[in-house]
Amino acid sequence: MVSVIIINYNTFQLTADCIKSVLHYTKETPIEIIVVDNASTEKDPCEFSKLFPTIKLICSERNLGFAGGNNLGIQAAKGDFILLLNSDTYLLEDSISLSVAAMQQHTQVGVLGCRQVFPDGAVQFSARRFRTISWELFDLFRFLLYLLPPATRSVKMLGQYFKHDQSIEVDWVNGAFFMIRRSALAQLPHQQLDNLFFMYGEDVLWCERFRALGFSVYFLASTTIVHIAGASTVIQKQLQLRRVMMQNELLIMQRRKGKGLYFYCFACLFMAKEYLRLSIKWIVFKTSGKLIR
């Protein structure tokens, strides 16, 4: 069985649409759907139970964030596999059963993510490598990458350099569709996911933890979901969000490598590159009114 955990925080209609798609498409695998409401004020979360009588509804008295909310759901989960599914996603096919089949075939996989697209069909960069100094330098001086064969460049960098058209072992996958093997989760302290961050960057942190335990992380290209992932239309909010993500990236690197020479070299390179990118976003917005993804 798969325990599907969906966090709701003032996204009632998106969450309802997500639940509908899971119930509609999931045919080959037994599931339980656990909705964790993170103290929403938009609408009474009990409305979920009226619409979907078979779900488990957990109402938190306060907003626990993404990690905290999922850990609350995990405590109630009974499945051999646990799927953390964002409320702003919806299925196009039986992605859950296809993902379970892949994890049963690849027994060392602890975490699996699948192909994700925006509503307009554009591919999201959900198969990723951990950031390193070499990755940042190649990304900055990307003309050097084109000295490599295309297949080598794609696998080495992943992300925007990868077509997301082949299933492959990766460093981390986007947390919007994040399937975890129960036996892998059982090896974490208290069988809980790390809640270092309130939001953003948890997927990187969690994949690093599972890989340290000897499990692999797998990107499944043969099934696709839609991840709405609506970016704020306010440039200040978008830039503020990016700064939070940058801070979290540095904390992850500190935990991976320690706070030594490597960390400080990475931090200087990473911060300079990201602030240059933010400056370009700001200039493009001010001159054209367009927000760059």
Image (cartoon, rainbow, N blue to C red):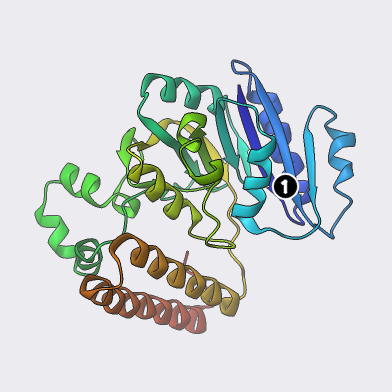
Can you say whether 55 is above or below 252 in the image?
Answer: above
Q: For mark 1, what is the residue?
A: 14
Q: Secondary structure at mark 1?
A: helix
Q: Quadrant of the N terminus?
A: top right
Q: Is residue 63 left or right of residue 269?
A: right
Q: Residue at x 21, y 49 (%)?
A: 156
* Amino acid on which disc 1 is placed: Leu
Answer with left or right where residue 173 lies relative to residue 13. Answer: left
* Relative vertical location of residue 44 with respect to residue 143 in this rendering, above or below: above
Q: Position of residue 290 (x, y in %)?
A: 52, 72
- Give coordinates of residue 239: x percent, y percent: 52, 76
Question: In the rendered image, is residue 87 in sight?
Answer: no
Q: In screen coordinates, is 24 left or right of 230?
A: right
The foreground one among 121 and 187 is: 187
Q: Where is residue 181? Give x, y as percent.
A: 48, 31
User: Hey, which residue is sitting farthest left in the picture?
Assistant: 147
Residue 140, by quadrant, is: bottom left
Q: Residue at x 37, y 36 (%)?
A: 218
As drawn, the residue found furthest toward the top would be 28
The residue that appears at 12% across and 46% down in the rendered structure is 149
Q: Residues within 10 Å of mark 1 (few under 14, many from 20)?
A: some
Which quadrant of the view contains residue 192?
Answer: top right
Query: In the depicted view, which residue is nearer to us: 245 or 283?
Result: 245
Q: Height in image: 108 above or below 171? A: above
- The residue depicted at 47 percent of the width and 51 percent of the height is 203
Which of 107 and 21 lies nearest the eye of the viewer? Answer: 107
Q: Using residue 253 as the reference point, say whether residue 71 is left or right of it.
A: right
